[in-house]
Image (cartoon, helix red, strand yellow):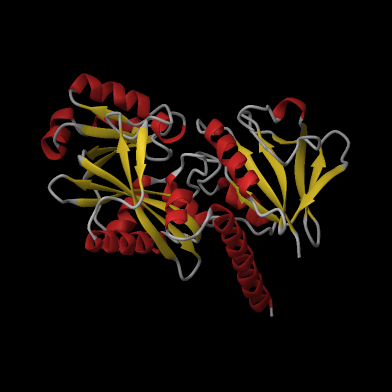
Amino acid sequence: MERKIAIIFGGKSAEHEVSLASATNICNAMDCKRFTPVLLGIDKKGEWCYDKEYPTTGVNLVKNDYFSKAEHVYLSSSKSHIQVIEKKSNRVLADFDVVFPIVHGTFGEDGTLQGILKSLDVPFVGPDVLGSAIAMDKDIAKRLFRSAGIPVASSYTLYKHDASSYTFEQIAARLGLPCFVKPANAGSSVGVSKVTNEAEYLNALQEGFRYDNKVLVEEAVVGKELECGVLGNEEARASVVGEIVATESFYSYDAKYISSTGATLQVPARIDAALSDSIREYAVRAFHAIGCEGMARVDFLLSDSGKLVLNEINTLPGFTAISMYPKMWEQTGVPEKELITELIMLAVRRHERDTNLSVAVKL
């Protein structure tokens, strides 16, 4: 049966443009014999938009503005699918039965969008509400990783209303310099600063608090940046490990998504088999520790002295032309078209499982 897949992209976060690039790649790589893509955008104000004239072949959402001629819409659940309805006229413009959400960052991968989709009772790719929310909050996620026996970097958690609870001297004495300041609830290196002195630290706090009311100050683990993809529901598996060779001082937002020369991607990573196996095992354990299903990219740091820590877990990893998640799976033997198909079918199977559970509870 051919399924209509709504690729939801855009959003209000600082990662809006990255989402456009990811959605472009997914739409163009999707198996057109099995799936019909339905492009559904969320603009920078948070309005849901649909352009019924926008082509779904040879898509380039980065270059060709989707939102300029799109109508404002809302979603409504029917017995067999979800309808896209124009706000002005209440006309049904399109329908779909599975969602591939690729709205990066706040309101997209923090459980907010997942809650909307769950309330519509529609299958969707990626982790559910809880796993998405926990993964977005680096502070809470780190606590669960520690409980699961997964190594993480030493850190302080600071709140905006009480940012002076620790002095710079206290932080530097425990974490050393340089260290990193990052918003607790933001992705893709947004708002992250490298700190070498007190002036930089104060500026970094100000920058971090632009994006969240809670920030983490973490020790710098200088060495290799390693990543591993996870795929599956109850029985997840790990990809080969990839390595980021950043040409900047750290793997910044621009290096990840915008600059094709900001970093070199080495897949597989230049590490021995034993370490690779450990990272893959930690990645799957972390995935389950915070309740993820579907997919995630798990990021690690390996110091020059051999210290390995889990840095963060990303539940809607980038799918741009230079993104690591699809590249790692390709090297594992899962081409991008097959990867997208498997993600969609994982969403469908989870929805069927949870629907059957709901029916059993009612009985």
Residue 337 placed where, x, y %? Answer: 59, 54
Residue 263 placed where, x, y %? Answer: 35, 34
Q: Residue at x 34, y 23 (%)?
A: 206
33 left or right, relative to 94: left
Q: Quadrant of residue 84?
A: top right
The residue at the far bottom in this view is 363
Residue 318 placed where, x, y %? Answer: 49, 43
Residue 60 placed where, x, y %? Answer: 64, 33
> How many numbered marks, from 0 up?
0
Q: Quadrant of residue 148?
A: bottom left
Q: Quadrant of residue 210?
A: top left
Quadrant location, the N terminus: bottom right
187 left or right, relative to 85: left
Q: Nearer the viewer, residue 249 or 188?
A: 249
- In this picture, is 78 found above or below 176? below
Q: Residue at x 46, y 71 (%)?
A: 235
- In this picture, is 294 found above or below 207? below
Q: Nearer the viewer, residue 206 or 104?
A: 104
Q: Nearer the viewer, residue 92 or 209?
A: 92
243 left or right, relative to 100: left
Quadrant location, the C terminus: bottom right
The residue at the far top in this view is 199
- In this picture, is 124 found above or below 264? below
